[in-house]
């Protein structure tokens, strides 16, 4: 049985579309792009009326829309294509998603949101808000989102004080979090222990606290490329977590190779400042079958061919190495 929704979604656009006047050409474009399921009155061209149409999905919305009426439909999915033309969305009316009790995936990438919309339905599993202008995550905004397993906040304006244990509270089943290309200078705190994949590329992180990953026993995929990590700020044993399979530390300022877990399969250390004779065969070997490393990148360092013999003898499963 489909849930009947009662929704009014206000699209607040910035720039030239805020003009009270529309040219004849703009009006014609708007009217011609009006979804066949909806009504776009000529005397109010910025409004698109799709209410009470029995819709199960949101139709593609014309580019000059200010007001979109969707109440009294059977909408279960908010697709990315539906709002593709509303590329400068700055806000979402509070409560607009609260009645979407079956909404699982919400994609609002490439807009101009300054904060995470709220409240969000407890049914949500994926939330993508990349390439917006988000600078804050209000406390408790994720409370009750026990099904959310993917949170994408890359390419926003988040600073250290925005990503805290308080702001992330409620993400009890989070698997993947993407905080790449923000303005972080420290590792985010408060990540739930269920976190498996962590994306932090393109920030300004200089160090990793001692024992940072001990509270993340399921962590398997870490991306810290394009940061400002230095070896003095990376404890030798900080990656001593047996679950880590893929570790990416490219384009940093490392001069030494940290200890790696024996279960690690992919290691990216390219474009750092590692010396010509690196001590790479330093690991926590808790696996009787030996290290599992299969892929290793060391190019862009001070290392020159040929491949050091100790690397080949240490990592017998290695199938690809780039120097």
Image: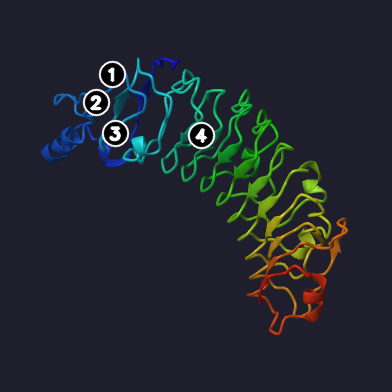
Percent across and percent down for residue 287 are 86, 57
Give the Cα distance between marks 1 and 3: 15 Å
Give the Cα distance between marks 1 and 2: 7 Å
What number is the disc on residue 61?
A: 3
Report crowding for label 2: few under 14, some 14 to 19, many 20 or more residues within 10 A (C-alpha). Answer: few
Q: Secondary structure at mark 1?
A: loop
Q: Who comes first in sequence, dot 2 or dot 3?
A: 2
Q: Residue at x 44, y 37 (%)?
A: 108
Task: Name the front one of labels 4 and 3.
Answer: 3
In which image quadrant can residue 5 be found?
top left
Q: Is residue 248 above or below residue 299?
A: above
Task: Name the front one of labels 2 and 3.
Answer: 2
Task: Name the front one of labels 1 and 3.
Answer: 1
| Circle 1 residue | 53
Percent across and percent down for residue 130 are 49, 44
Task: Tell me if 227 is positioned left or right of 28 in this view.
Answer: right
Give the Cα distance between marks 2 and 3: 11 Å
| Circle 2 residue | 37
Percent across and percent down for residue 86 are 33, 38
Q: Secondary structure at mark 2?
A: loop
Task: Tell me if 33 is positioned left or right of 89 in this view.
Answer: left
Q: Secondary structure at mark 3?
A: loop
Q: Secondary structure at mark 4?
A: loop
Q: Who comes first in sequence, dot 4 or dot 2?
A: 2
Q: Quadrant of the N terminus?
A: top left
What number is the disc on residue 115?
A: 4
């Amino acid at each position: 049985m489909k849930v009947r929704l009662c929704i009014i979604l206000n699209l607040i656009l910035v720039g030239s579309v805020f003009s009270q006047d529309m040219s004849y050409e703009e009006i014609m474009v708007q009217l011609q792009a009006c979804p066949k399921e909806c009504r776009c009155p000529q005397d109010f061209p910025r409004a698109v009326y799709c209410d009470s149409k029995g819709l199960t999905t949101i139709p593609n919305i014309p580019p000059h829309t200010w007001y979109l009426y969707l109440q009294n439909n059977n909408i279960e999915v908010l697709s990315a294509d539906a709002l593709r033309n509303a590329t400068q969305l700055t806000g979402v009316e509070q409560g607009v998603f609260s009645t979407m009790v079956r909404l699982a995936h919400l994609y609002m990438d490439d807009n101009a949101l300054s904060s995470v919309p709220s409240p969000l339905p407890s049914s949500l599993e994926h939330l993508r808000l990349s390439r917006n202008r988000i600078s804050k995550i209000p406390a408790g905004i994720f409370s009750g989102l026990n099904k959310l397993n993917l949170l994408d906040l890359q390419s926003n304006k988040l600073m250290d004080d925005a990503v805290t244990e308080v702001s992330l509270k409620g993400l009890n089943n989070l698997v993947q979090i993407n905080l790449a290309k923000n303005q972080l200078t420290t590792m985010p705190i408060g990540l739930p222990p269920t976190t498996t994949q962590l994306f932090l590329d393109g920030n300004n992180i200089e160090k990793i606290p001692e024992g940072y990953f001990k509270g993340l026993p399921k962590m398997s995929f870490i991306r810290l490329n394009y940061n400002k990590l230095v070896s003095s700020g990376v404890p030798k044993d900080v990656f001593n977590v047996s679950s880590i399979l893929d570790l990416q530390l490219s384009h940093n300022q490392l001069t030494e190779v940290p200890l790696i877990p024996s279960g690690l399969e992919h290691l990216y250390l390219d474009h750092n400042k590692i010396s010509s004779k690196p001590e790479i065969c330093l690991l926590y070997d808790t696996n009787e079958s030996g290290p599992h490393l299969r892929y290793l990148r060391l190019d862009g360092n001070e290392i020159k061919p040929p491949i050091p013999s100790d690397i080949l003898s240490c990592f017998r499963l290695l199938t690809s190495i780039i120097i």
